[in-house]
Image (cartoon, grey):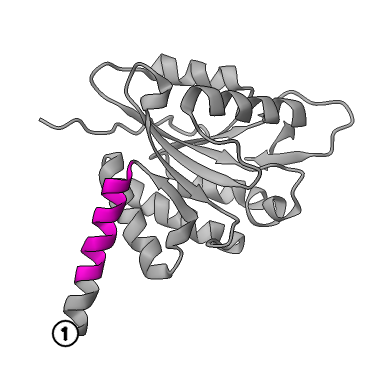
Amino acid sequence: MPKTIIYQKYGDENVMWPLGEYERLVHEIKRRENSDIPITFGLLIADYRQQLNREYILNYINRFNYKSNKYINFYLPGYYEEEIYGSEQTIKIKAKKYYFNEEKYMDFLEKLETDFDLEYSYNPRLILIEYEHGNFKNAKRIIIELDNEGADIKKTGELFETIFEIAKKDVNIKGFSKALTLHEFKKGLFDRIVEIIDNKLLNGIVDDYSKVRKYKIM
């Protein structure tokens, strides 16, 4: 019987979690680790210092927190509950302030690169990860660029809405990948998905979709 994903639900608590430092991510993963059922979570990489991140991503964190409907948790590296003296680099989730720490943010990304084999990114990214057990490098993941040549950061909200709708179906990451990729392909934003489990799945999705289009044209 195939394994399925269990999306953690926390009552009225947030599903957008400012994590601060990398060690808290490891703690969250390990405390939910299960030898039989993999866990799925998202990482929203958004540097507060970049203006477009504030305008089109961070300003809508409350909306994302609400719309995710507790189906999947998202973690925000580099943001702390503790007040940082003199800092005006803040976001709000449910009227509570969280403070951005540049040093901890960069340290988080460097450790993420080492442990998960995820390339350090200077641009905003959304990373969906499915972890079962063992080495973090073996975790399945989908990497979505939010601001590059194939993506429009202004459409980040629409992307999150799509992800939340897919997550309601409780599919595993392979099914999630296919649904998301086909959606992005139809929207002409396929290039922003830079990594999706493996190339075989990616090629398979493109081939399948090409056949569907060819069939419709004929």
Residue type at numbered disc 1? Met
Which residue sits at x=56%, y=45%? 125
Which residue sits at x=55%, y=57%? 156
Q: In the image, residue 69 lies at what x, y percent?
A: 42, 44
| Residue that badge 1 annotates | 218
151 to the left or right of 33: right
Q: In the image, residue 144 lies at what x, y percent?
A: 48, 49
126 to the left or right of 88: left
Quadrant housing the N terminus: top left
Q: In the image, residue 194 lies at what x, y percent?
A: 46, 50
- Residue 170 sits in quarter: top left
Q: 12 above or below 156?
A: above
Which residue sits at x=30%, y=17%? 34
Q: In the image, residue 187 lies at what x, y percent?
A: 42, 69
- Residue 19 sits in quarter: top right
Secondary structure, magenta segment, majority class: helix
18 to the left or right of 38: right
Q: 171 above or below 7?
A: below
Q: Is residue 168 visible?
A: no
Frontmost residue, 133 versus 121: 121
Quadrant housing the C terminus: bottom left
100 to the left or right of 41: right
Q: Is residue 60 visible?
A: yes
Q: Check the image and name the residue furthest to the right.
A: 86
Magenta residues?
Answer: 198-211
